[in-house]
Amino acid sequence: MGIEQGDGDAQRFAAMWERYAPRIQAYASRHVGRDDAQEIVAETFLVAWRRLSVVPGEPLPWLLVVARNTVANHRRSQHRARLVSDELARLRDVAAPGPAADGVVEERDALLRALATLTAAEREALLLVAWDGLAPAQAAQVAGCSVTAFKVRLHRARKHLDVGRPADAAPRDGRLALAPQEG
Amino acid sequence: MRPLTLDDLRPQAPLDPDGLEAARILVLAQVAQTAQAAADGPDEGRDDAADAGVLPLRPRRVTPRRVAAMTAAAAAVAAVAVLVPNPSDPVAFAGWSTVPSAVGDLEALGAECIAIPDEVEVSNPQDEDPQDVASRSLRDAVAKVGDRRGSTSLVVLTSPGGGFQSCVIGPDFRLASVVGPTGSSFSNPSGDLPGEGAIGIGGDRSFPSAGEATFASGDIVGIGGDPALGIATGRVGEGVTGVELTLSDGTVIQATVANGLWAAWWPTQDVPAGLTPIGADGTRLPTADLDADEYAQLVWQIADAGA
């Protein structure tokens, strides 16, 4: 990382950056896009630097909580309608290409499209587990709800994702329904 | 072939090496700037802000006094215990909206508020400030503003005894909350919420200047459950006819403003993050950022401990 403090804190912070900054960037990118993600990453790690003494030994959930707050502050200044097309574009940009096989491109697109039409809370629940690799208790902490509530949300999200996977799935969120469907 | 799953599409890191390098440079620059400022000498406002976890990357218009008050309050209110008698009974805040509706008979709601039994469980009563004890009584309080959303209303009262006194009145839920002169907050839910945690959020109880609004106090109760309940109150200065309260999840709530006060409630455990006064002509006046990080962390710690 290159912070010249020469003590254990600096080393710990540098190690934390090396291991988790890419994951915070991936989280931020799927919420605000690549252009603004770098600012979210920087703000998140500045909070971590200042509050290093309270960062837990397993820092990812803590970092994601800070990133979530930073994203919320960022959105507050944007006041933009959240469109399905925007969500889908961010997801396409962030998601891995998937295994090389016939039909994967279409299947990937259908899956991401279904994901984009979920409510923000449901999409977040799925991705905190599937992409960020969090256990339900950790993910609930990031989502700001109880573990029980998170598990219910995750269950519903999985059901809705299955239902929404056909290409002609309708949006499930009132705000999202205002957006034009691509394709 | 098995169907594609979300696990198959997990992002490959690093997603954007150039963006990550830009972020790294930004962090280094900010850390270096902070170190240089520290070497140049103490700055009361900056140090208070840093202690409160405030980032230098976004503009901030909160006075050091407020930061100090809110930080101190966070530590103080963590010791306040709240009993919820029937955690299994759901509470519906049906009809909640980011825009309030007409409150109706404010005086009657105030009387109903005063009638709520003022029983407070304090974990360390010997440490209580006598002024706080005195100010807990709702007698002689006058209702000043009512914030109605759906079938539930937040009523804010003032009394000769001191701090803001407020209550939430709904068909299934009642809460009395009193903020004493030292900034501490005490809650007494007489209804039921699934979650059992609660925090009070202290703020600035002074009278704001023209064109400004202050955050005076707030409570988050039912932490760890769904729904939870958040309430917030404050004062408005001359020329301010509206207030927008932004929560930590980005939700923007139009508060009710009357008699020099503003009030708002919401059915989640998200914490207040920003305050925007609105002028009579609709002009958005300078926004005050609140210490969302500090309180959000506290909420999640409590929720996690109760999980």
Image (tube, coloured by chain):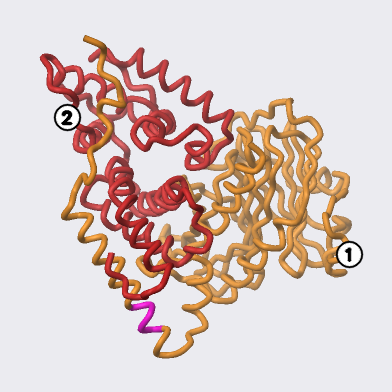
| Palette colour of chain B | orange
User: At which x and y percent is residue B186?
Assistant: 77, 55
Specify the quadrant of the image occupied by residue B55: bottom left
User: At which x and y percent is residue A75?
Assistant: 36, 49
Going 62% across and 53% down the picture, which residue do you hit? Answer: B232
Q: Nearer the viewer, residue A128 or A1?
A: A1
| Palette colour of chain A | red
Give the letter of the chain under mark 2.
A
Position of B139 compared to B33: left or right? right
Asked whether the beta carbons under mark 1 and mark 2 sit within 8 Å of each other, the answer is: no
User: At which x and y percent is residue A17?
Assistant: 33, 57
Position of B109 compared to A40: left or right? right
What's drawn in magenta, residue-wise? B33-37
Q: Amino acid at mark 1?
A: Gln
Going 64% across and 48% down the picture, which residue do you hit? Answer: B220
Q: Which secondary structure lies at badge 2?
A: loop
| Mark 1 lies on residue | B126
Name, please, the residue furthest toward the bottom: B40
* Placement of B19 over or under A162, stated as above or below: below
The circle drawn on residue B161 is: none
Q: CA distance from mark 1 to mark 2?
A: 62 Å
| Mark 2 lies on residue | A97
